Amino acid sequence: MNFINCRPGCAACCIAPSITSAIPGMPNGKPAGIPCVQLDENLHCKIFGKPERPACCSGLQANLEMCGADRTYALLWLEQLEQATQPNRNS
């Protein structure tokens, strides 16, 4: 996998996916498509590198497959992943 540095001003991974673990300011996690309350006005994580950052966030690493060439691609890719991994509601 080709890991890359995060694209400035993207924050797709802090918006598109749902997070089920507690986040400071979001004790019940966050729904898909809703920006995390820990994003600042410059789309930087306020708890990056801090122990209160959820493991799912610190474990996610930017890569070419997920991030593509621009923010729009990343948002769409993560939205599709979110939809594909939802539990089957017909079972």
Image: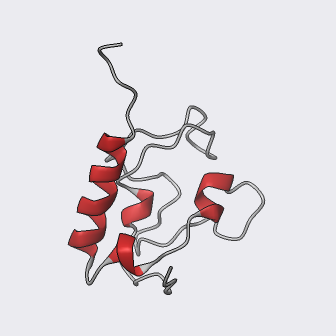
Q: Nearer the viewer, residue 81 or 17?
A: 81
Identify the residue shown where x is 45% and y is 78%.
63
Q: Nearer the viewer, residue 60 or 38?
A: 60
Give the percent coordinates (x, y) of residue 61.
55, 72
Q: Nearer the viewer, residue 18 or 87?
A: 87
Q: Is residue 49 above or below residue 89?
A: below
**Is residue 2 found left or right of 55 in the rendered image?**
left
Q: Is residue 10 visible?
A: no
Q: State the image quarter where residue 20 is shown.
A: top right
Q: State the image quarter where residue 10 is shown.
A: bottom left
Identify the residue shown where x is 64% and y is 69%.
48
> Is the C terminus in the top left, top right, bottom left or bottom right quadrant?
top left
**Is residue 40 found left or right of 77 in the rendered image?**
right
Q: Residue furthest right?
A: 51
Q: Is residue 50 above or below residue 20?
A: below
Q: Residue furthest top?
A: 91
Identify the residue shown where x is 40% and y is 38%.
31
Q: State the image quarter where residue 8 is shown.
A: bottom left
Q: Is residue 86 above or below residue 64?
A: above
Q: Nearer the viewer, residue 39 or 81?
A: 81
**Is residue 1 found left or right of 57 in the rendered image?**
left
Q: Is residue 14 visible?
A: yes
* Count of numbered circles on the image: 0
Give the percent coordinates (x, y) of residue 17.
40, 50
Q: Is residue 19 above or below residue 38?
A: above
The chosen color scheme is secondary structure
Give the percent coordinates (x, y) of residue 16.
35, 53
